[in-house]
Amino acid sequence: MNSIWNKNIELFSRRFPSLAESLNLSDTEEPDFDFWEVVPSKSQTLTARENGIFLHSAYNPLREAESQVKAAKNDEIWSVLFCGIGLGYSAVKWAELYPDDTIIIAEPAPDYFFAALKYNDFSALFSHKKLILALQAGTDQITGLVENSGGFNHTAIIENKAHSLHAQDYYSALLALIERNRKKEQINTATLEKFSKLWLKNSCRNIRSFAKLDGVELYENKCPETLPALLISAGPTLSNVLPHLKELKKRCILVAVDTALRACLKAGTEPDFIVLTDPQYYAYRHIAGLKSPSSVLITESAVWPDVYRFSCRKIVLTSSLFPLGQYFEQKLGSKGTLGAGGSVSTTAWDFARLTGAKTIYCAGLDLGYPKLQSHIRGSLFEEKAHQNANRKNTSEKSLSTSLFAANSMTAKDYDGNLIFTDDKMKMFAWWFESKAQQYSNIQCYSLSSQSLAIPGFSFSSLESLLQQKEGLQERNSFFEAEKTAVSPASEKAFNLALEELKSGFESLYALAKKGYKIAETALNAVTPAKYIQELNLLDKEIMQSEFKEAASLVFPSENKLASMFSETAMPEDQTKVMFIKSRIIYRELMNGIRLYQTNLFE
């Protein structure tokens, strides 16, 4: 028998005993695989062909693997994803050269992984302390592994086309999903840099609401199975649904986004729920001056403070996306988590899902520009365009700019016709697509065939929904849930958590100040290296603080820190460079804590 195969199987079984047992590998003789033609290269190292295509160099596969690995690795990479491995040369080389990195191997066809064990010694790989072997894993599982290992911006993606041809559709979908997540992460980082101080100030002004308001978990799984939910977004096709909202309210739970509220009220119908979670002032403008006495407003702790003065029947909170709110939830209890896909419509859909609704209809969820329109007629967006119009800048010109502002492209609607959309809308569509896969027990429908087609969603005519029987009894049963509300945390408990936070911030500030002074001292010392251990101990203390996450909101992102470092004159002495960077980090930590203290306690 093949000694390489025996050795690899023994190492594999030792490293992944449960997987080996489930595959009966301990009793498996060396298998035959007929998809590769394995031949010696010019250097006598084995290479292979599949369907006439070489998997590795025909001259020197080992040198090729080392070049590929070194080209993909840099100081900002501490994780790698292999999309297939061929005979495994590059994966083994990465394990040999970078023992501290995380290595993820994604292979939907296990035979291709085990075939490599016949021809190449995997000792370095199977002894690697951070090896993740993902056989037959879903693309969403792989992206989760990447996100939780090195993150999308710190993970090298190695895909040799010859290694992935046997599962081309799988790897294409995986790479597209990773790219979407990478773009999302970049957008989130840019948004954080731009709005973090606003979110902090809003959170500080609103935080006492945690001691007073219920959370959305009040409605979790309270929806009768026969009662559908209707998501009301502000796309142009909503105009077709508005005249029928009164009848639809008899048959559905109406969940409207903030941008659609004005149109709903003009149509004479108050939604059951209004969702507003965007912290910016312009989001508040969508409901400013309006009132909806029978509606429940779903909001977040970091929204513009005037949102809490909106005239409605009840205000409930969703779990906060921001560190200050999350701190108080840990102390006082969760409000109920809703998904955040970058759009208020994603949050509204997830609330409908949280209620337990088994059918969700969508009105105005266009995710594109049907008939080259961006929003429903009469929305705040359109009214603002008309108000600001003049002879040189007409409302038509203002409204049309959105069509070309985010890499406009075409896609297909539910009828198979072309519709204009853009990168941002496509990202939202991907979020809905992923949720349709995750919650396959929920039937999702668009009430307009002219909206961007979302995989996993279907078209359903408005007429068919109107023909369904009324569900007044089911609606009454659903809203009875409010009577079972658990009382929010007491003000005494809130004040205790607030005092703990105040004390925690003072301690964290003192640690950062101490670190800053140590770094200053080291930079002026003859032998600065002797202060490294002192800073290491102090950093460990900071990282163990339960208050560091609350302070992280206004701490600079990696990109911002890199920019600060590049703008600072650095000496050639790398030890001093380390202390200069440490000084900048401690300074920014102090600034962030001081901003919290100013807004929260003074």
Image (cartoon, grey):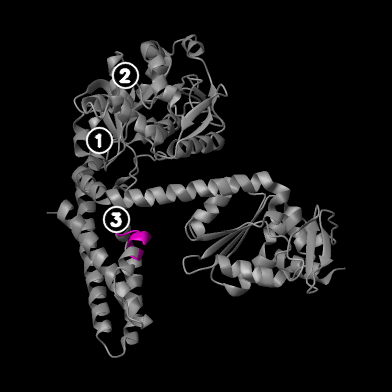
Q: Residues within 10 Å of mark 2 (few under 14, many from 20)?
A: many
Badge 2 amino acid: Cys
How far across and down, in percent of the image, does residue 282 sit? 25, 35
Position of residue 14 in the picture relative to residue 447 (left or right) = right
356 and 457: which one is in front? Answer: 457
Q: Nearer the viewer, mark 1 or mark 2?
A: 1
Badge 1 amino acid: Tyr
Q: Residues within 10 Å of mark 1 (few under 14, many from 20)?
A: few
Residue 11, can we see it? Answer: yes
What residue is pinned by disc 1?
Answer: 282
What residue is pinned by disc 2?
Answer: 264
For label 3, the SS is helix
Residue 241, can we see it? Answer: no
Q: Nearer the viewer, mark 1 or mark 3?
A: 1
Judged from this view, the residue extending furthest toward the front is 392
* Residue located at (23% from left, 47% from top): 198
Q: Main secondary structure of the magenta part?
A: helix
Segment tinted magenta in the rendering: 554-562
Badge 3 amino acid: Ala
Task: State whether residue 365 is above or below residue 36.
Answer: above
What residue is pinned by disc 3?
Answer: 550
Cα separation, mark 2 vs mark 3, equals 38 Å
Q: Nearer the viewer, mark 2 or mark 3?
A: 2
How far across and down, in percent of the image, does residue 596 sit? 21, 55
Residue 484: give its label.
none
Cα separation, mark 1 vs mark 2, equals 19 Å
Q: Quadrant of the N terminus?
A: bottom right
